[in-house]
Image: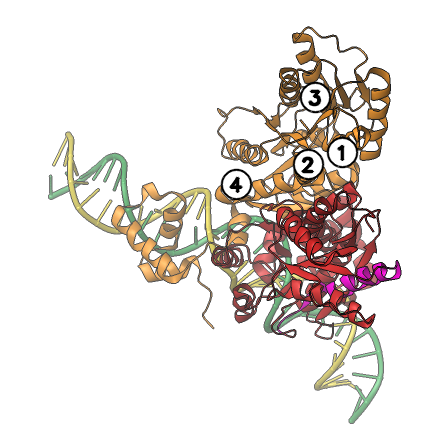
Chain colours: A orange, B red, C green, D yellow
Amino acid sequence: MPEKVTIATVARHARVSRQTVSNVLNAPHIVRQETRQRVEDAINALGYRANQAARQMRTGRSRLIAARIEPTRDGINGSVLDRFLHGLTETADAAGYRVLLYTATDDEREIATYDDLLGTYELDAFVLVGTKYGDPRTAWLADRDVPFVTFGRPWDALDAHPWVDVDGAAGTGAATRHLLAAGHRRIGFIGWPAGSGVGDDRRAGWHDALRAAGIDPTGLHRETEDGITEGERLTRDLLAAVAPTAVVCASDSLALGALQAIRGTDPPVSVIGFDDTPVAAAVGLASVSQPLGEAAARCVDLLTGVLDGNHETPTHVLLQPSLALRHTA
Amino acid sequence: MPEKVTIATVARHARVSRQTVSNVLNAPHIVRQETRQRVEDAINALGYRANQAARQMRTGRSRLIAARIEPTRDGINGSVLDRFLHGLTETADAAGYRVLLYTATDDEREIATYDDLLGTYELDAFVLVGTKYGDPRTAWLADRDVPFVTFGRPWDALDAHPWVDVDGAAGTGAATRHLLAAGHRRIGFIGWPAGSGVGDDRRAGWHDALRAAGIDPTGLHRETEDGITEGERLTRDLLAAVAPTAVVCASDSLALGALQAIRGTDPPVSVIGFDDTPVAAAVGLASVSQPLGEAAARCVDLLTGVLDGNHETPTHVLLQPSLALRHTA
DNA sequence: TATCCGAATTGGATCGTTCAAGACGGCGAG
DNA sequence: CTCGCCGTCTTGAACGATCCAATTCGGATA
């Protein structure tokens, strides 16, 4: 069995000192061209790889970022996180970072996990998905100057920390305008109770688009917790009350419920969901599509900016969604 | 700012040597009860956490396991991996391990990634999801004595390495028997081309169940690549040829296609899918459900067994699926 | 020729932990 | 009484990288 290749092995092979090899790796510009070449050749010939643990012990940086993988709730929205995670892994990899997973059942435990991860693994940064008003997790991290980025705006103070988000209002706005252009006038909205940043944002897009078209949105919307059953219930209610010819929903779960509710209507009531989940694609549901890969990439950009001390990079990014049109619209 | 708490800090505080603290952590039984208590008190008082990088450098073990997150293909089957990953993270955590993500677009790059992860991060083990006949990845890992477990049997040699799998034949068998009990006689099967271990296994369950009921399965099955469109096409073909009253499918994707094809039949043709994906739950599709959390837990069990040198643990585990009955069956 | 300068390189110390070997006191056997 | 052993604890070295201070060397300057 071949003995382990360390920086000393490379140094001996290239007939230079350990420090010179280290310089070739970390500060190539201060090494003479000819020497550098010799060292690089040795590295390739021996298949040397810098030992991350040793490097970390000296520098205190692990090149590891943590992301949370959530228990699959209704399984529909879970796929959003899944796609985001995949993008994150890919982009982080390209930037020389690795993604470590963790889970937590509530905020308190999640914070305990931060403490543990920071203490034992010396993580470089965290990526949080979804934040709420007065989120204790971001406060904890900020208090300790731990670098982190959220996918989702901090609704109570936009400048609190770096974030990446998708413009939900633009998405529901575009969906509504698409329906208006198709001749619809009574366009309903099924969303979440007021108070959640994301929900209010998505409703605002629909609301403002109707207003801009000279239509009064009063009475045309309903609010409920997320879920297929709830979506169906509220859509039936809305149909009975104001007979909309189209419905925009805050999520694909709600939209799937809406689809059940409108079954058999003639002409069929149009439905547009939100998130463009695989379920939507499978059942032909039109939906607002978030650029998740792009969002993940921007998160990594922001993090590397912070970690490498580039304070010139922007601290927040708002991406535009697109409309995935299918036969329900 | 408080200075870093190391093993030396704890030692000083408890008035023992560094090594004694280390022993309390790693071999408590060789430390006198009274001393141990004093050290443990100091650990708690100071909030000491062992530095993983330093430990790793000395022991060569990182307490990190790697799992691959795949690009969301059609997004339906992706959720299976997602749920598995979540279970894996949770169980690994409980066993003192963390899960590191990686991606790769093909086998060659995946192997290059193994090399990189092993070289720079000294990963303890890998979890592979899905293997095929003559898989180059498992061969590479086995060659180098890298511990790993697969979720999915190595179809060409069941004793090649530790694995966890779900009994697909039992699943399709149960589905078929359920349909038989409901009075169906002509039960079709839509699956994948012969040659894939998983596909052949799932077809065998259906085949044998029919045979056991004294029914000749000849002509009642069709094979195709996975996908909704393909599933629909083949189901139409099967309907036209032999007019089955029920169809068992090798995946939820195929089953969704089948649902499109049978629309309007009277009495409705029954359909049962495989994987119990969120999509199935959403559209009311009956499906065979894999115990993914349990599978992940068993993977961790096998790994810790290998890593801790327990060669007495079984090297493979075959779990039984259950039937999620919904209105399509 | 002596002095100085900066670029390039060197050896030693260090990060926090575990391993290997040894020190110390008490106890039982010879 | 002495020897060896066992249980308990301590000391020094090592893992593989980077940081720091010191050194070499060729060339420019006085």
Disc marking residue A256? 1
Q: Does dot 3 land on a helix, a strand or a loop?
A: helix
Disc marking residue A202? 3
What amino acid is found at the position of numbered circle 4 in the picture?
A: Thr
Q: Are marks 3 and 2 in contact (CB under 8 Å)?
A: no
Q: What is the distance, in whole Å, between disc 1 and disc 3 at their CAs?
A: 17 Å
Q: Residue A4 at what x, y percent from top left?
A: 47, 65
What amino acid is found at the position of numbered circle 3 in the picture?
A: Arg
Q: Are marks 4 and 2 in contact (CB under 8 Å)?
A: no
Q: Please tell me whether residue B149 belongs to the stretch shown in magenta.
A: no
Q: Residue B5 at what x, y percent from top left?
A: 67, 45
Q: Give whichever of discs 2 and 1 has the lower sequence position.
A: 1
Q: What is the distance, in whole Å, between disc 1 and disc 4 at their CAs?
A: 32 Å
Q: Give whichever of discs 3 and 2 has the lower sequence position.
A: 3
Q: Are marks 2 and 1 in contact (CB under 8 Å)?
A: yes
Q: Which residue is mark 4?
A: A91
Q: Give whichever of discs 4 and 2 has the lower sequence position.
A: 4
Q: Does dot 1 land on a helix, a strand or a loop?
A: helix
- Marks 3 and 2: same chain? yes
**Chain letter of the residue beneath label 2 in the structure image:** A
Q: Are marks 4 and 3 in contact (CB under 8 Å)?
A: no
Q: Which residue is mark 2?
A: A280
Disc marking residue B67? none
Tell me if residue A5 can be seen.
Answer: yes
**Chain letter of the residue beneath label 3 in the structure image:** A
Q: Give whichever of discs 4 and 3 has the lower sequence position.
A: 4
Q: Is residue A223 above or below residue B272?
A: above
